[in-house]
Amino acid sequence: MMPACTVPKVILYAKKNGVNPSGNSTNPSNWDFSSSFFFASTVITTIGYGNLSPSTVSGQVFCVFYAFCGIPLNLAFFKQLGKCFTIHLGRLEKGLVSVVPHKQAFEAVAASLFFIAGTFLFLVIPPLLFSYVEGWTYGEGFYFAFITLSTIGFGDYVVGTNPGKTYIYLYRSVAGIWIIFGLAWLALIFNMAASIMEHVLDQTYPSLRKQREAENMPSSEIEATSKI
């Protein structure tokens, strides 16, 4: 007879490897395409829930190299996606500059609309879906969304891990795509907020702007300015 102290370990090991301890059936593989895509998304975004991880030496070695190459590439992707959003906002600004008399007013309205639309798309609507599919409350769904997009990733709430539910095949893949584009939107929001704060500081403290311009100015221009 198996000692009682080893029973929980056996149950945890069985569940980790896809065996349903409550019956004779088995759960879908932990490493099907949808789960693997979701895992890959959490690696390159540095979220790392911890509920799924490679258990073989070869898988761990590959994961190290994948993260080593994937994280910088993902940051570059975020940067390019932010530039793409900025370009489209600039084109929209040029198209509507004749309608809006003040450029700064248009920029404030555009930034507000971008923030509101992104908030609904990435932080308000997804928790509704997670609550419906996972059986969570809306607060738990919003908590999961915030912890995910902030890259904290506690792992106490993770989508697609309830053994008592049957999920759509691409459910976790769609969640992985939501993570990637949600992080890109959040990064752009942070960049816009930093630009706004910088502009406010420039208007409040002109000396700071002159100092920053002097620091960014090439040495040849600094010498020419000093001679003048």
Image (spheres, rainbow, N blue to C red):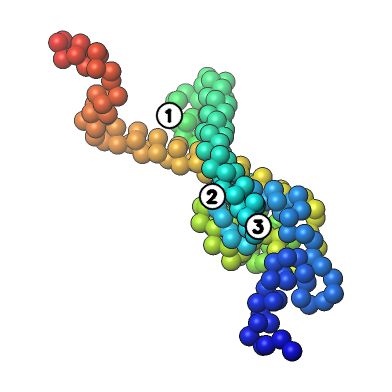
Residue 164 picture quarter: bottom right
Residue underneath mark 2: 46
Farthest residue toward the right? Answer: 24
Can I make out residue 21 in this image?
yes
Disc nearer the start of the sequence (3/1): 3
Q: Nearer the viewer, mark 2 or mark 3?
A: 3
> Which element is circle 3 on?
loop
Say above or below: 124 vs 14.
above
For the residue carrying disc 2, how many other residues have a C-alpha within 10 Å: few (<14), some (14-19), or many (20+)?
Answer: some
According to the picture, the residue beneath numbered tag 1 turns out to be: 104
State the SS at label 1.
helix
Name which residue type carries label 3. Answer: Thr
Distance from Cα at disc 2 to Cα at disc 3: 21 Å
Relative height, residue 61 to residue 53 (above, below) = above
Question: Can residue 114 be seen at all in this image of the molecule?
Answer: no
- Tell me the residue at 47%/23% (across/down): 101
The 10 Å Cα crowd at callout 3, few under 14, some 14 to 19, many 20 or more, is: few
Q: Residue 110: percent from the left, percent from the top?
A: 52, 34
Q: Which residue is mark 3?
A: 56
What amino acid does circle 1 point to?
A: Gln
User: Between marks 3 and 1, how big is the CA–CA gap?
Assistant: 56 Å
Q: Is residue 59 left or right of residue 75?
A: right
Where residue 27 appears, as percent x and y from the top left, is 79, 65
Could you say which is closer to the camera, residue 104 or residue 86?
86
Which numbered disc flags the more N-terminal residue, 2 or 1? 2
Do the residues bearing badges 2 and 3 touch, measured as CB atoms within 8 Å?
Answer: no
Q: Residue lying furthest left in this view?
A: 227
Front residue of this view, candidates 168 and 198: 168
Query: Could you tell me residue 103's position as x and y percent?
Result: 45, 25
What residue is rendered at 65% in x and 57% in y?
A: 56
